[in-house]
Image (cartoon, grey):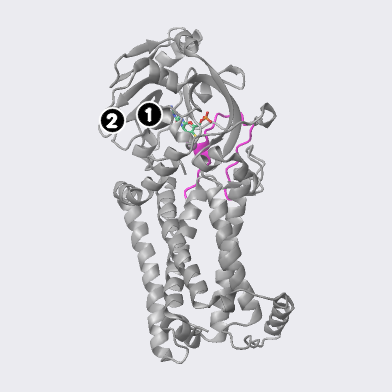
Amino acid sequence: MPGFFPYWVVVTHFLNIFFLLLLARSGTEVLSSLPKLYWHDDCPPGREWLRFSKKTYGADSRRVWSSLDEEEAWSPVIALPGRKNLGLGRHWHFMSIQFWILTGAVYICMVFVSGYWHYLVPTSWSIVPESIRAVGTYLHFQLPARLPGQPFEAAQKLTYFLVIFVLSPFQILTGAAMSPAVLARFPWYSRLFGGKQGARSLHFLGLCAFAAFTALHTFMVVIHGVPKEFAGIVLADVDANRTLALAVGLTGIFLVLVFHVVVTVLSLRYKRATQHLLGFMVNPFERALSRTFTSREHYGRADISPYFRVNGYPPVGEEYARLSADGFRDYRLAVGGLVDQPVSLSLDDLRRLGEQAQVTKHNCIQGWTAVAEWAGVPLALVVDLVRPRPEARHVVFYAMDDKGLTEGEGRYGYFYGTVPVYLATHPQTILALEMNGAPLPVVHGAPVRVRIETQLGFKMVKWVRAIEFVEDYRDIGMGEGGWREDQQYYANAAGI
Ligand SMILES: Nc1nc2c(c(=O)[nH]1)N[C@H]1C(S)=C(S)[C@@H](COP(=O)(O)O)O[C@H]1N2
Ligand SMILES: [Mo]
């Protein structure tokens, strides 16, 4: 049998505290962008089971609203980094998750290799009555005895088992059930958790469970005596010098807190650098998902959501008004750039290329979902028509909405988005002209909007004016590969 507190437990326990706090705070930031939880993927506004926001928008709201209006600015004291920074919060979350999983994998290996699992994994149902008895003992203000030859009492062992072998995998699985690439490729997977909204709600309840465990665990350490407990978990030796253990342990906690203060302040001050630095670690992973998964969504018409949120106010200005006034008869879609055959297509030209319909689920980065039927021209057909040159690596979609006029908040410029060329030829990548059997409504992107079903909503540019094939997007806009990437620090890869 291994000792009660081997060094690898000390190290992984510390790393666990470190990454879990990052995950909790950055997860809170993600929640702040849509502080509402639902059980059904239609998630109509007003039907949330839990809401952390005073703002209420109804599906029947008389005022035009956009889903970004639902976002809340939360304090940097709780959220990482706080103040409506969904893009950066996601970066922190996805950076931390990789290292938390790595820590967990090392820990689990060591647990089984060393035989430590005997202390953690109950091998008899008697653990249940024993745990109940242990809890009863605590309630009589006494400390239950440890299991013979083991470091923990029964309730403690059972709790650790549940946190390590049930709650942690549960958080990873419900987390994966929110990735648009995973959901599009394996629609059955999300059904395990009651859809994406079920996964979101359960993931949040998992966070609550972690928080409750942490509070109880800390309380138990206090009533058992901090210096004694720290000797074990900090110095790997229950008989070690307790003053030293206390000093080292409290220093460790202090350093974690200092780290959080520093990265929060730096993230808020140097947003672009944070986006780049964390993106360097996260984007390759996101891209791998986007590249390998194609959408296999085939929902039925009966699944179509009664209400589909809008994100992004329609273009204002004469030109768009003029175009829409006569049903976009004068609309022309320019397709050019690094192609052999630049074209300018009317809506009829587009339709003649060939149409396809698909009932799919939309995933906004904020977390809401909605199912609709989209019909339009596969982008692959347009690619065949214009024949991009080999050096073309990205497709740019230019939109007609000037966000400075439609949204404000200090942001400006026409909306645009880019995707790697390989996404343009995925089977469910289309230029949609219709939604739910009718011409595309203005708020949803009339006359043409992009659908790329493995990606987050912000990649699906509405009100498309032109398409350009480019080698590099760095000289477009602020150079991050899209308007939301430029102005809201979203990741350029959108498969998660
Ligand atoms: N031109 C333009 N396209 C856009 C946006 C926008 O603001 N302007 N918002 C994006 C985001 S973040 C989402 S979630 C979807 C929302 O599509 P919907 O309004 O049809 O629901 O559009 C995307 N395309
Ligand atoms: Mo979005």
The range drawn in magenta is 52-73
Nearer to me, 59 or 175: 175
Q: Residue furthest left?
A: 475
Q: Secondary structure at mark 2?
A: loop
Q: Is mark 1 within 8 Å of ligand 1?
A: yes
Nearer to me, 453 or 252: 453
Q: Earlier in the sequence, mark 1 or mark 2?
A: 1
Q: Is residue 351 magenta?
A: no
Q: Are marks 1 and 2 in contact (CB under 8 Å)?
A: yes
Q: Is residue 78 visible?
A: no
Q: Is residue 213 visible?
A: yes
Seen at 58% across and 54% down, the residue is 203
For residue 268, which numbered disc appears in the image?
none
From the viewer's perspective, is 401 left or right of 185? left
Seen at 61% across and 51% down, the residue is 201
Image-quadrant location for residue 471: top left
Amino acid at dot 1:
Tyr
Q: Is residue 94 above or below residue 453?
A: below
Residue indicated by mark 1? 416
From the viewer's perspective, is 211 left or right of 274? right
Q: Is residue 53 magenta?
A: yes
Q: Residue 476, position in %: x, y? A: 28, 30
Q: Secondary structure at mark 1?
A: strand
Q: Is residue 232 above or below residue 63?
A: below
Seen at 46% across and 41% down, the residue is 495
Amino acid at dot 2:
Ile
Instruction: Report the Cα–Cα distance between label 1 and label 2.
Output: 9 Å
Residue indicated by mark 2? 476
Q: Main secondary structure of the magenta part?
A: loop
Q: Residue 475, position in %: x, y? A: 25, 32
Number of marks present in the image shown:
2
Neighbor class of circle 2 (other Cα within 10 Å; few <14, some 14-19, many 20+) is: some
